[in-house]
Each structure stands twice: as structure tokens, then as C-alpha cells.
């Protein structure tokens, strides 16, 4: 039985979907008032443009306030959270282009070397913000030529004006190897992970040393990272057509309501709504 249900918030709405005319892109258009995004990361990029209200985005170096006319740009694997910055919340359009899509646009339109990304997190650029909204409008109208074209123009513009080469892999910090081994254990045993003390003993370290090393390496403590990783894996299962209740058990959540709560706070929509949009995309 599908027990998934959106929160009873008549002043909030959200659509998280894929448009088959632009492979490698997820889209989210929403109005949030009381909803907040817990600390999480993305495998690809985030490009967000607020239409009304203010969104407070908490980044590793502090909080940024996204207003109409700004564009928020978040690189892959950067921990962040978000909430309303004013009582009336915020309305926005967000693009989630994959790392591969951004890399191909950068290679064709910029001289950036290495792994291309964004050197700034938020910029005042009303024209780029308008383009983000236009990608959504074109996709919702089924205009593949316009959606793909405007997306590429948007990403290229932002990369040329605010892009840079992301840092490459550096020598691991003290404890970095331990953090990597801990991450692999949690990946492999996601459905039945060890406790922090058990994990530390298994890796030959202490719980607090492991906490420090893991957060230094991934920007999140192990339990928060694990929740984020579970939601990522659940998304892949839902993409493949798995029912939310089955996906919940497969990734280690106690039941579907447990998945619903964490999934909604990271993705922005409940898993049932997410899966229905995927099914509609694939039928299209």
C-alpha cells in the first residue's frame, strides 16, 4: 500500500521532475513556507533562482540570502541546508544539471581547465535568473529545442562570468584514509550499519577521532552522511520503478514514513510524488 502523502500545507506546492528532452537534468519548481531542507549534498550541480520571497541557504562558510534577481550556484558534494528567510516563504525554480552535462558545456564554451565549477555561491544576475525560469517554462511546454538551448546558454553564461576550476584531489588530511574506509563500510552496509563505537573499533580508532576525521573529509558527521546516502540510493530505486515502501526497507529506513520524512527534507517532495513524476516522464 502506498502510504506516501504530502504534508497538509495548502500554501506550499512543489514539482520535482525530469524532462526527457534534456537528458542529465532534474528540475524543481516550488513554493515553500514552513518546509526546510536538512543538511545534504548533491552528486551534480544546483542552480536556483528565487521568483518571490527570500530563501536562506546555509553553506559551509555561512548563510546566503537568495532574493529575486539572484542565482544560487552550488557545486557537487557541497553540504548545505535551506529554509524560508521571510514569513511568506519563497517561490523558486531550480535546475540540477549533472556533472557530465556541465563538463560538456564548459569544454565547448569556456577555457576552464580541469573540473569546471563555480567560484561563487550567489550572484546578482537578473538576466541569468530569468533564463533559469525560462528553462522551466520551455520544459513544461514540451519545447525541447528551447529548453535545451536556454539551459546551455544559462550554464555557459554563469561559467564564463563566475566559473573556475574546482580543486583537485589533494593529499589526505590526517584521518582521511580512516574516513574513506568508514564511508565504504557505511555504503556497503547501508541497510544495517554499525554504531559509531563499533565502526571506530573496526577501523582501529576512537569514536571522537572518527567523527572529526569524517566531518573534515565529507563536511557531514557519519549519521547525517548516511541519511543523505540512503536518500540518494532510494532515488535511484524509485527511478527504476521500485515502490516507496520497498525502497525504504532496501536502504535501511525502518518503514515508508521514515523514508518519507527524510526524503522530503532532502529532495523537496515526498517519494511517492517523486516516483509518479518519474513514471510520467518515462511514459512521455
Image (cartoon, grey):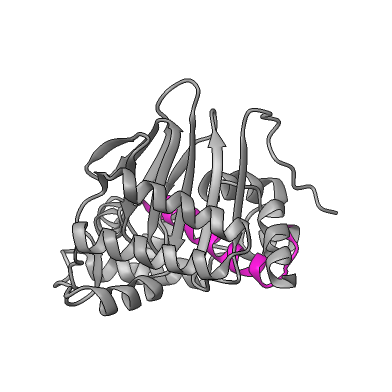
From what the image shows, is residue 191 above or below residue 8?
Answer: below
Please identify the residue farthest to the right as the structure is shown: 1
The N terminus is located in which quarter?
A: bottom right
Q: Nearer the viewer, residue 90 or 52?
A: 52
Of residues 276 and 42, the one nearer the viewer is 276
Q: Residue at x 49, y 28 (%)?
A: 89
Q: Is residue 181 visible?
A: yes
- Classify 189 as above or below 52: below
Check the picture and name the quadrant holding the C terminus.
bottom right
Residue 108 x/y as whole percent: 28, 79
Q: Is residue 224 magenta?
A: yes
Would you identify the image quadrant in which residue 35 lies?
A: top right
Residue 268 point in image, percent of width and height: 56, 46
In the foreground, 119 or 237: 119
Q: Is residue 29 left or right of residue 212?
A: right
Q: Is residue 255 visible?
A: no
Query: Magenta region's main secondary structure?
Result: helix
Front-most of 119 and 19? 19
Which residue: 49% across, 61% down? 229
Please determine whether, in this image, residue 235 is positioned above or below residue 55.
below
Magenta stretch holds residue 195: no
Query: Would residue 25 be found to the left or right of residue 276 on screen?
Result: left
**Residue located at (45% from left, 56% from top):** 95
Q: Position of residue 33 (x, y in %)?
A: 53, 29
Q: Position of residue 196 (x, y in %)?
A: 41, 55
Q: Which residues are magenta?
A: 221-244
Q: Write down the quadrant of residue 98 in the picture.
A: bottom left
Amino acid at each position: 500500500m502506498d502510504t506516501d502523502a504530502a504534508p497538509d500545507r495548502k500554501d506550499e506546492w512543489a514539482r520535482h521532475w525530469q524532462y526527457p528532452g534534456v537528458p542529465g537534468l532534474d528540475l524543481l519548481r516550488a513554493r515553500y513556507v514552513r518546509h526546510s531542507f536538512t543538511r545534504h549534498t548533491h552528486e551534480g550541480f544546483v542552480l536556483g533562482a528565487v521568483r518571490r520571497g527570500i530563501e536562506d541557504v546555509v553553506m559551509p562558510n555561512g548563510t546566503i540570502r537568495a532574493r529575486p534577481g539572484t542565482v544560487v550556484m552550488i557545486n557537487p558534494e557541497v553540504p548545505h541546508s535551506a529554509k524560508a528567510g521571510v514569513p511568506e516563504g519563497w517561490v523558486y525554480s531550480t535546475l540540477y544539471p549533472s556533472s557530465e552535462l556541465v563538463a560538456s558545456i564548459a569544454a565547448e564554451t569556456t577555457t576552464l581547465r580541469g573540473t569546471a565549477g563555480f567560484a561563487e555561491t550567489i550572484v546578482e544576475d537578473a538576466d541569468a535568473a530569468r533564463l533559469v525560469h525560462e528553462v522551466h517554462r520551455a520544459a513544461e511546454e514540451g519545447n525541447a529545442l528551447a529548453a535545451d538551448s536556454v539551459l546551455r546558454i544559462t550554464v555557459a553564461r554563469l561559467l564564463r562570468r563566475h566559473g573556475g576550476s574546482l580543486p583537485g584531489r589533494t593529499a589526505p588530511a590526517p584521518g582521511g584514509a580512516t574516513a574513506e574506509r568508514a564511508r565504504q563500510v557505511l555504503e556497503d552496509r547501508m541497510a544495517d550499519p554499525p554504531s559509531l563505537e563499533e565502526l571506530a573499533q573496526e577501523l582501529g580508532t576512537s569514536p571522537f577521532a572518527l567523527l572529526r576525521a569524517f566531518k573534515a573529509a565529507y563536511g557531514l558527521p557519519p549519521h547525517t552522511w548516511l541519511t543523505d546516502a540512503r536518500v540518494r540510493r532510494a532515488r535511484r530505486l524509485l527511478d527504476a520503478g521500485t515502490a516507496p515502501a520497498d525502497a525504504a526497507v532496501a536502504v535501511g529506513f525502518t518503514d515508508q514514513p521514515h523514508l518519507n520524512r527524510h526524503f522530503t527534507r532532502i529532495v523537496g517532495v515526498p517519494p511517492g510524488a517523486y516516483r509518479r513524476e518519474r513514471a510520467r516522464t518515462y511514459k512521455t
